Amino acid sequence: MKGIDHMYISLAWGFLIMSPIIVTYPIYFVAFIVGIGIGAILPDVDGSISPYEYKSDAMRTFGIATKKAYKTTAWVFKSVKPNYNRELHTHRGILHSFPGALLCISIVIIPINLIIYFLGLWDLPILVASGGIYVGAFFHLFEDCCTWTGVRLFAPYKNVRLYGEINTCSSRREENRPQMYGKIFALLGVGCVCFFALHNLPIFASVAFIYDLSPFVLIIITTVISFFLWYIIFLYSGGKIETNS
């Protein structure tokens, strides 16, 4: 998918997940969404041009650090995994897997958090934003599972590829499914926000118990709903699972 598609879907996905706390904890909502916006294009630093290249100075600096972390990540997996597939050191390679993305982001995010902490500027929203970067990157991987090239989510430990039919690079026809998916996530998020904002209406009396749940539990519920929706999207995109020995 294109970077703009990843950004659109990931922000809408994050909006849905955090919709229960938009009104009550807006600072955490904003921090999480900012993190997702940064992380949503992070896996594509394995391409020839960094997705942060034409952003702000801070984003370009983050992109340079992530590019170096990506090279370090590839070196680590070569060292600990003797049968490391060299093809994973390309676009849609090791950085498009959970282990690779997790390590690469950690190499960048942990030092940044430590620096902010020792400067006396660290606070909980920083942690939430950092978590959002991880989540945004993982959303990117799930979204790429719907494309024709697909991704190997567990490389280099499992050679299982998830792929679909979406091809945003084709010039033969316009591919509008990514935009449609983003709209679905966004509309559900808006629905959740309205549901919590209008909870005093008599029509919602039968589900009043939901408002007594903790924000953490509510976020778990919206997360489960969002991943169920992703699974439907994956199937609608012609999703398949390929296992190679």
Image (cartoon, helix red, strand yellow):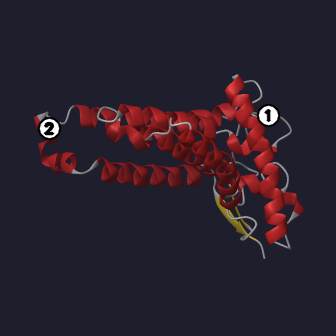
Q: Residue at x 53, y 33 (%)?
A: 34
Please state which amino acid type lies under the numbered disc 1.
Answer: Arg
Q: Which residue is identified by label 1?
A: 172
Q: Nearer the viewer, mark 1 or mark 2?
A: 2
Please state which amino acid type lies under the numbered disc 2.
Answer: Ile
In x, y percent, where is residue 65?
Answer: 75, 40
In x, y percent, where is residue 64?
Answer: 78, 37
Q: Quadrant of the N terminus?
A: top right
Q: Residue at x 83, y 51 (%)?
A: 71
Q: Quadrant of the C terminus?
A: bottom right
Q: Tell me the tag on residue 203.
A: 2
Mark 1, Cα crowd under 10 Å, few <14 / some 14-19 / many 20+, is few
SS at badge 1: loop
Q: State whether residue 3 appears in this view.
A: yes
Q: Earlier in the sequence, mark 1 or mark 2?
A: 1
Mark 2, Cα crowd under 10 Å, few <14 / some 14-19 / many 20+, is few
Q: Quadrant of residue 166?
A: top right
Query: Between marks 1 and 2, how big is the CA–CA gap?
Result: 48 Å
In x, y percent, where is residue 104?
Answer: 71, 52
In the rendered structure, the answer to whether residue 91 lies left or right of residue 157 reads right
Q: How many marks?
A: 2
In this view, the residue in front, 58 or 168, is 58
In x, y percent, where is residue 174?
Answer: 70, 31
In this view, the residue in front, 59 or 155, is 59
Q: Residue at x 33, y 51 (%)?
A: 216
